[in-house]
Image (spheres, grey):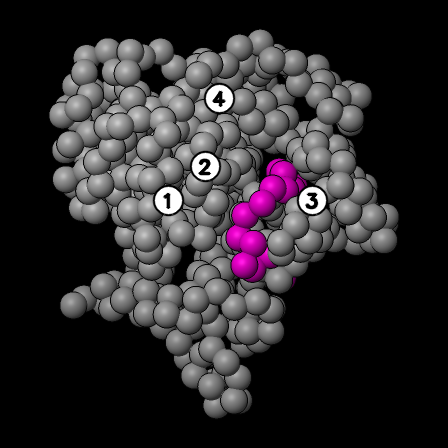
């Protein structure tokens, strides 16, 4: 086992501690590391769905403007190094080895102080800050891991924050109602900073407004302070007109689905806020960058073994609604064949009630994750909609069966957990 393999093994072993709330561990670790998170210009992106799209879009735009831009996302789709990028390039293996060795030293100090050690995500967050500091990035776009208030990324003081939307997800960790979840996510609002939201839920907006007022922050709301007018939704492009008090823009956004209107608007409004703060932005380069954004695994249309394949990380109810809309309104096919795997902590039945009526044949499989227990239950939820249901735990066999069932005019849709899509992508590669 080489040094890089040992580094990855160490990081993977930290997963056994799971997710733990609180900022005490990450704050102590960063303090021991010399507070590498300080002094960087951040944009903080949270929300239930769409935060990844917004993060990669802002990174692409700022990179195209000539800024050295860091990006921190999770989980990854191809390789763990994908989580930490500068100008679209993954962190080098050598840097991971170096930084993990340093973090292990500081973790030992925490242990000597009778402190609990950091979790996997906390270590990754510290790794990102170390890399961005050493490389002197001009901006860093940071995706929230889980929730907001007590997420380990919430140690930063961003130029502005974005909350894409708030819907039901991670109820075991964030709360049993949308209002409770909104309060947790509102924790990324910072004193005197701008917060932008795409939420259209009045209850959520009231909670965000209350928090913004308490912190003397400005809240900008989609369809109030800035708007979009849809031109068309196409298989690989969303076209719309963006408007705010200072700008009208025709946009071709290379991500597609109904909520990309929302995400695209959030991205451009965030860029407008940076312009207000005095940062140099060429709006023509913004328009060009929006055409070139890549976010694999999100309504990603591919050809595999001569068959049309659609990959989508519809991992929760809101994602399933969006996928169902896309399958009905964007894509053309004779029959829809589905390979689906959803984690047990999601509302599986409600998700299948969204997409089940569209499926002609279904293969239910198991994502490679501890939270995938009872995956076979999904087959029962499909029974009201189709009789052609296969249960195949092995993902490789599930893909082979799906390809065999897909005719020339059909569409094979592989949807659900991003952990499943990650493994599918390995097979494709």
Ranked by sequence position, the earlier of labels 3 and 2 is: 3
Numbered tag placed on residue 325 in the rendering: 4
CA separation in Å, label 3 and label 1: 33 Å
| Residue picked out by circle 2 | 351
Q: Give the distance between the C-alpha atoms of the residues marked 3 and 4, in whole angstroms.
A: 31 Å
Q: Position of residue 30 (x, y in %)?
A: 55, 70
Which quarter of the picture shows residue 363?
A: top left
Question: Is residue 169 a member of the stretch shown in magenta?
Answer: yes
Dot placed on the residue nearer the N-terminal end, 3 or 4: 3
The answer to whether the residues at label 3 and label 4 have Cβ atoms under 8 Å apart is no
Asked whether the residues under the numbered discs 3 and 1 touch, taking CB atoms below 8 Å apart as contact, a structural biologist would say: no
Q: Which residue does the numbered mark 3 point to in the structure image? A: 160
Residue 342: which numbered mark, if any? 1
Whether residue 324 is visible here, answered yes or no, is yes
Q: Position of residue 211 (x, y in %)?
A: 80, 51
Q: Nearer the viewer, residue 144 or 201?
A: 201
């Amino acid at each position: 086992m080489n040094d890089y393999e040992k580094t990855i093994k160490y990081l993977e072993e930290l997963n056994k501690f799971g997710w733990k709330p609180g900022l005490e561990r990450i704050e102590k670790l960063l303090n021991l590391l010399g507070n590498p998170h300080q002094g960087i210009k951040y944009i903080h992106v949270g929300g239930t769905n769409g935060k990844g799209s917004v993060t990669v879009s802002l990174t692409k735009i700022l990179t195209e403007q000539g800024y050295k831009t860091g990006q921190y996302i999770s989980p990854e789709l191809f390789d763990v190094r994908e989580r930490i990028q500068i100008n679209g390039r993954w962190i080098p293996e050598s840097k991971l080895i170096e930084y993990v060795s340093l973090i292990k030293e500081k973790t030992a100090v925490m242990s000597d102080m009778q402190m609990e050690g950091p979790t996997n995500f906390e270590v990754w967050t510290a790794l990102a800050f170390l890399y961005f500091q050493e490389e002197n990035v001009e901006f860093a776009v940071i995706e929230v891991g889980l929730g907001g208030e007590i997420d380990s990324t919430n140690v930063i003081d961003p130029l502005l924050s974005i909350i894409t939307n708030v819907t039901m997800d991670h109820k075991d960790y964030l709360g049993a109602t949308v209002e409770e979840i909104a309060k947790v996510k509102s924790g990324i609002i910072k004193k005197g900073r701008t917060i932008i939201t795409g939420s259209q839920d009045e209850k959520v907006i009231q909670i965000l407004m209350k928090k913004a007022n308490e912190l003397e922050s400005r809240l900008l709301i989609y369809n109030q302070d800035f708007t979009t007018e849809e031109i068309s939704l196409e298989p690989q492009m969303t076209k719309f007109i963006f408007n705010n008090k200072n700008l009208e823009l025709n946009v071709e956004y290379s991500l597609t689905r109904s909520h990309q209107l929302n995400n695209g608007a959030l991205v451009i409004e965030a860029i407008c806020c940076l312009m207000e703060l005095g940062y140099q932005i060429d709006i023509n380069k913004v328009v060009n960058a929006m055409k070139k954004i890549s976010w694999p695994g999100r309504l990603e249309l591919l050809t595999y073994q001569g068959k049309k394949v659609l990959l989508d990380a519809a991992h929760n109810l809101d994602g399933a609604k969006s996928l169902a809309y896309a399958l009905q309104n964007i894509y053309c096919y004779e029959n829809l064949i589905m390979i689906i795997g959803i984690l047990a902590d999601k509302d599986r039945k409600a998700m299948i009630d969204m997409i089940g009526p569209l499926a002609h044949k279904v293969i239910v499989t198991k994502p490679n994750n501890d939270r995938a227990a009872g995956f076979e239950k999904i087959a029962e939820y499909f029974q009201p909609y189709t009789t052609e249901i296969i249960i195949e735990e092995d993902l490789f066999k599930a893909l082979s069966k799906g390809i065999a069932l897909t005719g020339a005019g059909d569409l094979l849709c592989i949807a659900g957990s991003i952990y499943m899509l990650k493994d599918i992508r390995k097979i494709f590669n």
